[in-house]
Image: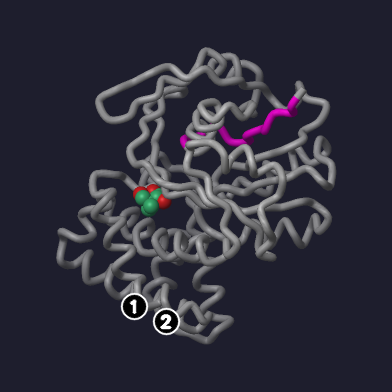
Amino acid sequence: MVEPWHILGAGAVGQLLACKLQRAGIPAQLLCRDLAAAQVLSQGIEYHEGSGSSRIPVSATSADQLDAIRALFITTKANQAITAFEQVQGLLRPDTPVVLLHNGMGVYEQLVQRYPSQHLFCGTTTEAAYRRGPCVLVHTGKGETSLGQFNGSDAPGWFTAFANSEEAFCWEADIAHSLWRKLVINCAINPLTAIHRCRNGELLDNPEYRAQATRVCAELAAVCRARGEESLADQVQDIAFAVMRSTAQNQSSMLQDVLHKRPTEIDFISGYLCREAHRLQVPCPLNEQLWQQLS
Ligand code: PAF
């Protein structure tokens, strides 16, 4: 029997991944906080895309029902990822692949330091989705999901099934670059939308917000340049503004967290950026201010 991928974190990203793996024919099972939540999800995910909808069958359980996990995606928020990992760590073997898929950076570094023998991978996605109910998923933007390892390794054997599917998975030899690209997008959009309580597109439409976003991007570009990421540095503002445009009607994940009074990922987004800027001695006063304001 092929061992399933377990997906820890049944929010929008986890549910979207479960649907993609189901369509790709890759066995997968969502891990919920308890069996009652798993039973609800086991009825399937009501999946909306454009004007169409369908019910996608998914499998779900809770970790206390398992003896072992052979392959794992962690799709919780960045601020919950380490606790989530530690909750299931007793079920993992050192060679169990663990793929981190969340906004922001910093979780990988902490995990690799504490669990150096674990097979850790990172991922980032440009797919956009939100949940309209516990099992109602709205897929608002098609994109790509890139996976890779910080040491730039070749794709492992398990990735073949992902590569052969039509679900837009790609192996990224330079995953750090992809993660930084996503980090600058999140730094430019998430804190400002959370503070101004506005949709992504308003950052372009409102002259005051646009001026702030422009300053944030200039600081981000200076950090990228100091890291040697010249081409990303040159494009920061274009990339961030293009995402604001293509997701104009979306509420960013950070705005949603603030509106629902949930902890945000600010420490893994602006916090991570500012710590890196400090190390490189690049001043980032506006990013610092946004980080402090939301902490
Ligand atoms: O966090 C989010 O909401 C998304 O990553 C992004 C790209 C900012 C679009 O809303």
Place residue 174 in its image quadrant: bottom right
Residue 154 lies, in percent from the top left, at 68, 58
Query: Which numbered marker is on residue 283?
Result: none
Which label sits on residue 222? 2
Q: Quadrant of residue 26?
A: top right
Relative to residue 29, is residue 261 depicted above or below?
A: below
Percent from the top left, x then y, of residue 91? Answer: 81, 35
| Left or right: 247 in relation to 292 | left
> Where 189 falls versus 97 (above or below)?
below
Q: Residues within 10 Å of mark 1 (few under 14, many from 20)?
A: some
Q: Which residues are magenta?
A: 2-12
Residue at the image position 25 percent from the left and 25 percent from the top: 51
In the rendered structure, find residue 218 and report the number of the disc placed on it. 1
Residue shown at 58%/26% (left/top)? 25
From the viewer's side, name the closer residue of 183 and 197.
Answer: 183
Q: Secondary structure at mark 2?
A: helix
User: Is residue 157 visible in this depiction of the protein?
Assistant: yes
Q: Residue at x 66, y 58 (%)?
A: 149
What colouring style does the render use?
one colour
In percent of the image, x 81 and y 30: which residue is there?
A: 68
Residue nearest the viewer, comparing 1 with 36: 1
Q: Are marks 1 and 2 in contact (CB under 8 Å)?
A: yes
